Image: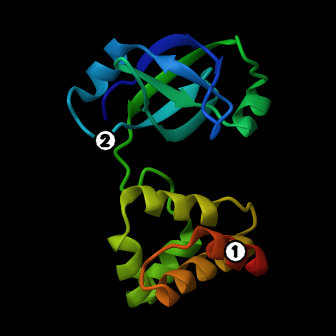
């Protein structure tokens, strides 16, 4: 595994409606990590305390940013304008997010569900991993895993997020 690249940045408010804030990653860091690689998945450690898997998102003009969700902002006491330190390394994991054990076991046991899950795009797989992995309790993760696999099977591998959200809420 390569040494992480270390840099400082400032937490900025985002103009994007999907997330509240982000920080800019220096172009040299992006070039050192990826060159011309298409995938820009990284493991980011903020302020030497909080590690998370994420993507470098293009901002235009060759700039890339990393989003910081509300949970991490609160945990680290970050506010807009706060100076942060970041360590980045390429995310070499299979999915770009942790595979919840409950979903892994279910996919091992359900050949059709496994096939449908693995025919999804990497981004859709990450979305489902995020949905299943959110609860702290294993039984809730299992219920979500069952709801996700059942949804894929009922919809021939297509995801209707509105319908899936209803199924997930009902299973929790």
Left or right: residue 33 versus residue 95 is left
x and y percentages locating residue 10 in the rendered image:
61, 12
Q: Looking at the image, is mark 1 or mark 2 earlier in the sequence?
A: 2
Name which quarter of the figure residue 78 lies in: top right
Q: Nearer the viewer, residue 11 or 132?
A: 11
Looking at the image, is 131 positioned above or below residue 150? above
Q: Which residue is mark 1?
A: 168
Image quadrant where one finds the C terminus: bottom right
Residue at image point 72% right, 17% down? 80
Left or right: residue 51 versus residue 113 is right
Residue at image point 57% right, 35% down? 51
Q: Which residue is mark 2?
A: 39
Callout 1: SS? helix
Q: CA distance from mark 1 to mark 2?
A: 29 Å
x and y percentages locating residue 9 in the rendered image:
55, 12
Callout 2: SS? loop
Looking at the image, is 113 positioned above or below residue 49? below
Image quadrant where one finds the N terminus: top left
Q: Nearer the viewer, residue 2 or 11?
A: 11
Density class for disc 2 (Cα within 10 Å; few <14, some 14-19, many ≥20) is: few
x and y percentages locating residue 55 in the rendered image:
45, 38
* Picture disc at residue 132: none
Left or right: residue 120 versus residue 152 is left
């Amino acid at each position: 595994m390569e040494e992480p690249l270390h840099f400082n940045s400032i937490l900025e408010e985002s103009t994007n409606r999907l997330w509240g804030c982000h920080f800019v990653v220096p172009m040299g860091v992006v070039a050192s990590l990826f060159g011309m690689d298409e995938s820009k998945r990284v493991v980011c450690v903020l302020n030497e305390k909080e590690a998370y898997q994420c993507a470098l998102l293009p901002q235009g003009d060759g700039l890339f940013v990393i989003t910081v969700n509300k949970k991490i902002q609160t945990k680290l006491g970050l506010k807009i304008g706060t100076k942060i330190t970041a360590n980045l390394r390429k995310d070499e994991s299979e999915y770009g997010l942790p595979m919840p054990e409950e979903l892994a076991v279910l996919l091992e046991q359900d050949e059709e569900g496994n096939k449908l899950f693995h025919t999804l795009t990497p981004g859709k797989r990450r979305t489902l991993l995020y949905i299943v992995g959110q609860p702290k309790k294993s039984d809730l993760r299992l219920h979500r895993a069952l709801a996700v696999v059942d949804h894929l099977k009922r919809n021939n591998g297509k995801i209707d997020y509105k319908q899936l959200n209803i199924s997930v809420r009902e299973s929790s």
